[in-house]
Image (tube, helix red, strand yellow):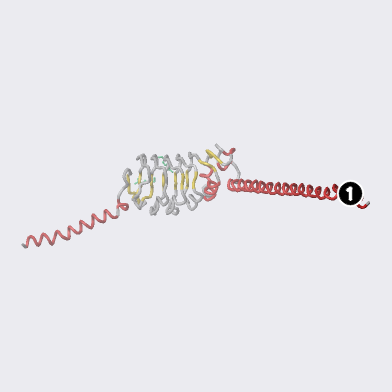
Amino acid sequence: MTLLDLWLSRSIPMCLLLQSLVLMALCFPSASMCPKGCMCQRDPHLHGLNVTCSQSRLKEIPPSLPVDTILLRLDHNQIGAVPDQAFHGLRLLRELNLSYNAVETLGEGAFSGIEGTLQVLDLSHNRITSVHKDAFARLKARIIVDDNPWHCDCALQQAIGGMAHNHEAAARVLCRSSELRDQEGRPFLAVDADLCNLAKRTTDYAMLVTMFGWFAMVISYVVYYVRQNQEDARRHLEYLKSLPSKPKKPDEADDISTVV
Ligand SMILES: *[C@@H]1O[C@H](CO)[C@@H](O)[C@H](O)[C@H]1NC(C)=O
Ligand SMILES: *[C@@H]1O[C@H](CO)[C@@H](O)[C@H](O)[C@H]1NC(C)=O
């Protein structure tokens, strides 16, 4: 009896403690666990983790990255997209290496939440053709965008305009294709053309042509209408002219004859 009491009094709190520990571990996996396919090393000087997920055949960015990640290596994978807010909550992230992946485009919020801390962003050797005009807008990081099949258009011009402090990156954007024929295969900054006004000018021309078309139609209709009416009027006039003159001659004769 006393032994059982003693055992119960000791084990119940122990059980509760164990249970709460298990629950805590389940509830906060991102704070402590290293993502599958990655290696996490604590850096004692920087008070954070170096997370290395290179060459891990990843098809997407690991969903639960440790919140104290400082350096994130995701290079040499098959990552096809960077969803909005993908790195949100990584308040210490300084360096992000996404080189040698299959990223095709970047949305407005791809790097949201890490604008203030990020210092290096490597996006080289991907399949990026276009980015949202504000994709790099508030980033202070050094951006590396070499070896991507860029399509040079108005949105890219705006995106590059947004990272004016990153002239080095902008200078390395080679246009695989472009709105302008003579820009293809050349550095984006080499051709001094305003691609946004180009698009606007094209729509202006289209509108002008359409308006001219309508105008021409209206004019030709008016001309046709006037001609038709003239014809009608002339025919009417001729009819009117012919009315009194033709029957008059015999009438006169008749009249004379009757009078006489
Ligand atoms: C983490 O990465 C940084 C930057 O590459 C390096 O200087 C540092 O030594 C690394 N720390 C560890 C523990 O690997
Ligand atoms: C990113 O990773 C690639 C491949 O390991 C490496 O060549 C490149 O130097 C890295 N980028 C930076 C900015 O360290």
The front one of 184 and 76 is 184
Query: Is residue 178 depicted above or below 135 in this figure?
Result: above
Location of the N terminus by quadrant is bottom left
User: Which amino acid, by three-letter code, is at mark 1?
Assistant: Asp
Q: Pointer 1: what residue?
A: 254
Query: Is residue 183 depicted above or below 253 in this figure?
Result: above
The front one of 126 and 95 is 126
Q: Is residue 255 left or right of residue 19?
A: right
Where in the figure is residue 183, as x and y percent of width and height? 58, 39
Where in the figure is residue 34, as x and y percent of width and height? 31, 48
Q: Is residue 78 left or right of residue 215?
A: left
- The answer to whether residue 172 is visible is no
The front one of 20 and 227 is 227
Q: Residue sitting at 77 percent across and 48 percent down?
A: 230
Q: Secondary structure at mark 1?
A: helix
Outermost residue on the left side: it is: 1
Q: Residue sitting at 38 percent across and 50 percent down?
A: 70
Where in the figure is residue 204, as x and y percent of width and height? 63, 48
- The answer to whether residue 26 is visible is yes
Check mark 1 vs ligand 2: CB closer than 8 Å? yes or no. no
Q: Is residue 238 left or right of residue 56?
A: right
Outermost residue on the top side: it is: 185
Q: Is residue 117 left or right of residue 247?
A: left
The front one of 144 and 26 is 26
